Image (cartoon, helix red, strand yellow):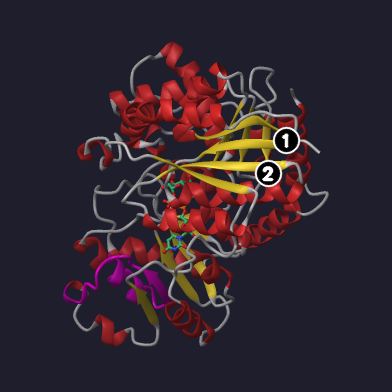
Amino acid sequence: MRQEQLIFIPAPGVSHLVSTLEFANRLIDRDDRILITIVYMKSPSTPLAELYTRSIADSQPRIQLVYLPRVDPPPSELLNSPEKFIYAFVENHVPKIKDTVRKIISSSSNSDSARVAALVLDFFCLSMIDVGTELGLPSYLFLTFNAGFLGFMLHLPTRHNQISTEFTDSDPELSIPGFVNAVPPGVLPSSVFNRDGYSTFIKLAKKFRETKGIIVNTFTEMEQRALDSFSDGQTPPVYAVGPVLDLKGPDPGLDQAHRDNIMKWLDDHPPSSVVFLCFGSMGSFGRTQVKEIALGLERSGHRFLWALRSAPLKDIMPKGFLERINGKGMICYDWVPQVEILAHKAIGGFVSHCGWNSILESLWHGVPIVTWPLYAEQQFNAFWMVRELGLAVEMRLDYRIGADLVMSDEIERGIRRVMDGDNEVRNKVKEIGEKARKAVIDGGSSSISFGHLIEHMVRQQ
Ligand SMILES: O=c1ccn([C@@H]2O[C@H](COP(=O)(O)OP(=O)(O)O[C@H]3O[C@H](CO)[C@@H](O)[C@H](O)[C@H]3O)[C@@H](O)[C@H]2O)c(=O)[nH]1
């Protein structure tokens, strides 16, 4: 049996790795011929991502991890800017590693018993498609975002042909094939309002159609309309293979006592009575916003589990807050086992920044979200879930980190809306969660799509 090697080039953040590595595992489970090489970019700022990637590679002999040598990082003023991060990564970092990646791929020799079949690229690494082309290898995009966002990316070059400058707040709403509603510019990623960020988006968007296929972490039952719009004869085949979730969570080193403490606390509360607040791998707030959240939580009267993810801020909490919430609320200053928490029956709602993994994990467990997007494509995701799919309730759709404060009364209203609101969204979320589980089992839509993808990837040469 000839082995088929796939070379994955993921972005180094944990939230991109979590679905990418789970996808790699599923490919291996599905097909004995497949071997996977992960080309890993070490970064001192992502120790958890490295630990997680190592643990996956250690547990699966058919996944090989190749570390790229460190290169000088892009200037920190670019890396730390939400508008310029994509420009910094794509235009400054990726070019510095291209040669090494080319060498790694070239040295992954083809033989009678094994061949390199394809590259699997993250959105942020899509310009590596040039390396694939030089070496005569097909490239696939593994998109860690949703099909709605894919629709936006595929539409960008059309918009660019008419208006070739970055977006502005006064731009008209966008009409995108496959969308019910026009898209207000306020929900687009902040990078597209910046000249450099916009040019990077256009560059990447043009590459989408050069891929051999686009793999999306979604499922047909949820995003049928958007997915149908890609059968336009111009878009490469799109494979909806999700939800691709690691239900154990991307945190192999998490302290067991911390985990147990949270789970024990949840065990003491009635079903669907606790609202969970967590803002992804990087989301945190300044002191004044933290105080408003505390006030909003208290006024809502609901039990809560709040992943605050910053040093204990006892001095800025409202006076007497920590004593008053005793027993009714739990604040965690550290990473929490989010997937396990969402699976707990005590959780009744989720205040989320709308990262795509968080959304999928929440739907999977039938927990409705109230939207509080912060950066990246999260505003778009909030719009998509609330306005297009009716699968979340709105606190904010277009909030951006560092913008105005979200005041306690708005937070209180948002929490009440998700915890006490009518059951329409909750029921829809439960239903779609069941459909998600069916999609990935044998004969389900994503499982079938997965099969087509493997055929395409390993039989096409
Ligand atoms: O305390 C925590 C915080 C996060 N997580 C997990 O970390 C992942 C976070 O992923 P996601 O919800 O997608 O959020 P981000 O970390 O913000 O993800 C980035 O990557 C996503 C996928 O590409 C994008 O949708 C987001 O906008 C982008 O910010 C999820 O698996 C969470 O379960 C935990 O387990 N515990």
Residue 129, x across and y down, in percent: 52, 24
Which of label 2 and label 1 is nearer to you? Answer: 1
Rendered residue at 36%/45% (across/down): 375
Q: Earlier in the sequence, mark 2 or mark 1?
A: 2
Which amino acid does the dot numbered 2 rest on? Val
Magenta span: 292-315
Per the image, is 102 magenta? no
Rendered residue at 40%/35% (across/down): 188
Which amino acid does the dot numbered 1 rest on? Leu
Q: How many marks?
A: 2
- Asked if marks 2 and 1 touch (Cβ < 8 Å), the reply is yes
Q: Nearer the viewer, residue 190 or 357?
A: 357
Classify 10 Å Cα crowding around label 2: few (below 14), some (14-19), many (20 and above): many
Rendered residue at 31%/50% (across/down): 44
The residue at which mark 2 appears reads as 241
The residue at which mark 1 appears reads as 453
